[in-house]
Amino acid sequence: MIIEFKKLLKNKLTYISFGIMILIVIGNTWMGTRLFYEDYAVSKRIFANFPDSLALVAPHRYWAISYGTFFAALYYFIFPLLIALPIVDTIYKERSSGNQRYQILRMSRFSYYLNKFLFTFIVSFLFFVLPLLLDMFLFNLITGKWDYSDYARAYHKLVNGTAVLGDSTSYGEKRELFSPLMEISPYLYFLAYLIIGGLYAGLYTAFGLASSLYMKNRYLILFTPFSLYIGYWIIFSLLGFQAWDPFNFLAATEPVTSMSYPPFIVVFTLLMAVTLILYIAGVRKQADLFD
């Protein structure tokens, strides 16, 4: 995989795509910190005698992973396209240039296609996670807030009904999913969503890689992961299954009601199964080119 990483670093699209994602999260940090300071100033006046309510107004509510601003929504809307651009067409380009035959002769067909799939999945995971981690770091750096134990304590009291609150708005902080993690630390709660989001980023790009074995148009290949994501979003939104829509269940703020754990698992399992079937069938379809 070292060779694959070297190719990735030489690809201009790597820097363009990753750079756009970094700019988006910087925009989220800029807008989010402003919103936090404004909301905290108002809350400090309203909840001066209600420390639990005030503790629940914390910077992590405005992180990109929380869909706190326009930039956060933009990140989650466009990430399948930006992540895929540098890597989803690698097999296609090597097949078109004739370099693929040379590489397969050096290793083996099995090693070549396995490395491509694993590399695509791992890099996509990292490309999704790293900008969001930068966003968290910048937020904490600007606000000076690194310890969220006060929020965790207030949230634990909120869940158990012992919190002393200034009004009912704080009840909106309750989470249906991964709530026990939030009671320990918001970091653990968002780590769960980082991992899930990274897995889905890898899945979308891997699906595009599998599809590239059947396509002869590079631009169709580049947009396949994004098309899968948007198509899935549109279909489930029209059917009224918002809780099964990835744009919703990847959001740590749980933007729709009736959220549950099955969508994460069922959707990922089914799409990964389809991806692997497509990929294996595509590899076998091209086997005669190297025999």
Image (spheres, helix red, strand yellow):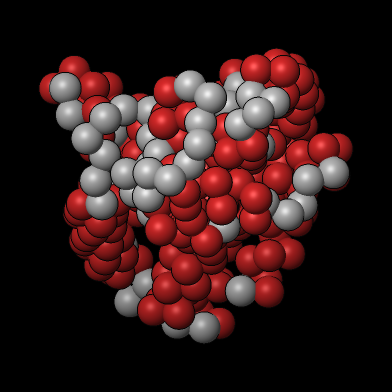
Pick the front one: 96 or 257: 257
Q: Is residue 59 left or right of residue 285?
A: right
Residue 193, relative to residue 79: is it above or below? Answer: below
Identify the residue at the far left of this view. Answer: 239
Q: Is residue 182 left or right of residue 2?
A: left
State the image quarter where residue 83 is shown. Answer: top right
Residue 76 in the image, given as x and y percentages of width and height: 51, 32
Q: Is residue 184 left or right of residue 109?
A: right
Residue 246 in the image, given as x and y percentages of width and height: 34, 37
Residue 71 in the image, given as x and y percentages of width and height: 63, 23
State the image quarter where residue 279 is shown. Answer: bottom left
Q: Please identify the quadrant where the C terminus is shown.
A: bottom left
Instruction: Residue at 31% x, 28% y: name it.
Output: 256
Total numbered circles: 0
Residue 202 in sight from this viewpoint: no
Residue 191 in the image, given as x and y percentages of width and height: 54, 57
Pick the front one: 288 or 167: 167
Instruction: Residue at 38% x, 44% y: name it.
Output: 161
Instruction: Residue at 23% x, 22% y: name it.
Output: 237
Pick the front one: 12 or 169: 169
Identify the residue at the far front of this view. Answer: 49
Residue 283 in sight from this viewpoint: yes
Instruction: Residue at 32% x, 44% y: name it.
Output: 176
Q: Please identify the quadrant where the N terminus is shown.
A: bottom right
